[in-house]
Amino acid sequence: MADKLQSVLALLNERAIDTDNWNEFVDKWAEEWTKESSSAKQEVIGTANEIQKVNDALRKRL
């Protein structure tokens, strides 16, 4: 997750170099960051759910 967010941050910062309108860029930057962080959060939740399923299955076997 950290690698994905770091990649997004690098891309957004690269785009910032070429911007002429900082207000417009800041809004777009915030929107993209929110979208990507939400996506990463969903991935973590999915992984946690899979881990929980494995734990539950192991408990049933014991």
Image: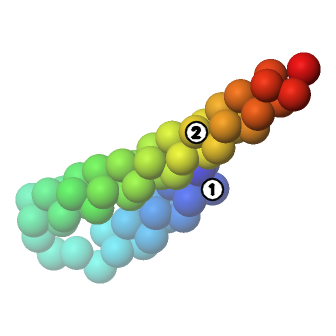
Q: Quadrant of residue 23?
A: bottom left
| Disc 2 target residue | 49
Percent x, y of residue 7: 54, 64
Q: Which residue in the rendered view is the most extreme toward the front? A: 61
Point 31% across, 68% down: residue = 16
| Left or right side of 43 for 60 | right
| Left or right side of 54 for 24 | left
Q: Secondary structure at mark 2?
A: helix
Q: Which residue in the rendered view is the most extreme toward the right? A: 62
Point 14% across, 57% down: residue = 27
Q: Is residue 50 above or below residue 18?
A: above
Query: What kind of colouring is applied to the model shown?
Result: rainbow
The type of residue carrying mark 1 is Asp
Percent x, y of residue 53: 67, 37
Percent x, y of residue 54: 75, 37
Q: Quadrant of residue 3?
A: bottom right
Regarding residue 44, the answer to whether it shows in the image is no
| Disc 1 target residue | 3
The type of residue carrying mark 2 is Asn
Mark 2: few, some, or many residues within 10 Å (few <14, many ≥20)?
Answer: few
Mark 1: few, some, or many residues within 10 Å (few <14, many ≥20)?
Answer: few
Point 65% across, 32% down: residue = 52
Q: Is residue 29 above or below residue 14?
A: above
Q: Secondary structure at mark 1?
A: helix
Regarding residue 18, the answer to whether it shows in the image is yes
Residue nearest the observer in this picture, 10 or 41: 41
| Left or right side of 29 for 48 | right
| Left or right side of 47 for 12 | left
Percent x, y of residue 62: 90, 20
